[in-house]
Image (tube, rainbow, N blue to C red):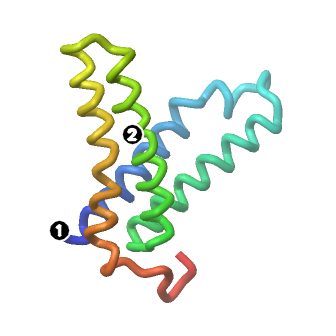
Amino acid sequence: MRVGAFKAFGVVVWSLDVLVFTTGFSDVLWTTSSSSSQKLKMYVALFAVLIVGLGLVGLRKWAAIYFSAPLFMLGVWIALSAIEQVSFPWNLFWIGEGISLMLPALVTVWLWPQLSWRGKWFF
């Protein structure tokens, strides 16, 4: 496996962040009815996701951890909860979804020696 997978993860994170910023939370970010603290929280979250995407493109270990650990935990939660809560033929799809969310952690383990904590810049 090559390190291009992490760069691709970073591009996907950037793309989804831009998509969410422009369309997904437009009612929170651009309307005057939402509070300023709610807007600030949303801007900080979107900025943090953008920084993680930048770290993934830069092949940083900290970004790999911030990206793959939450996805792994979410995948475990989805797969295990699908066993009881979803009827038999459909729970296999949900278990597959959970396993697919665990795959970035596997890529992180494989490529860990090729990643670095920091380089020329902090990111």
Residue 76 is marked as: 2
Q: Do residues under tags 2 and 1 come within 8 Å of each other at their CB atoms?
A: no
* Image position of 76 with respect to 108: above or below: above
- Residue 100 position within the rendered picture, expressed as x and y whole percent measured from the top left: 27, 41
Would residue 14 be found to the left or right of residue 123 on screen?
left
Residue at 50% in and 69% down: 62
Residue situated furthest front in the rendering: 84
Q: Which residue is mark 1?
A: 1
Q: Nearer the viewer, mark 2 or mark 1?
A: 2
Mark 2 to mark 1 CA distance (whole Å) = 23 Å
The amino acid marked with disc number 2 is Val
Identify the element where label 2 is drawn: helix
- Residue 77 position within the rendered picture, expressed as x and y whole percent measured from the top left: 43, 35
- Residue 40 position within the rendered picture, expressed as x and y whole percent measured from the top left: 75, 43
Residue at 52% in and 30% down: 24
* Image position of 81 with respect to 122: above or below: above
The amino acid marked with disc number 1 is Met
Residue at 38% in and 59% down: 10
Give residue 74's quadrant in the image. Answer: top left
Along the viewing direction, whichever of 75 and 61 lies nearer the viewer: 75
Mark sitting earlier along the chain (2/1) = 1
Residue at 42% in and 51% down: 13
Would residue 33 be found to the left or right of residue 88 on screen?
right
- Residue 113 position within the rendered picture, expressed as x and y whole percent measured from the top left: 32, 80
Few, some or many residues within 10 Å of mark 1 (<14, 14–19, 20+):
few
Give residue 80's quadrant in the image. Answer: top left
Give residue 37's quadrant in the image. Answer: top right
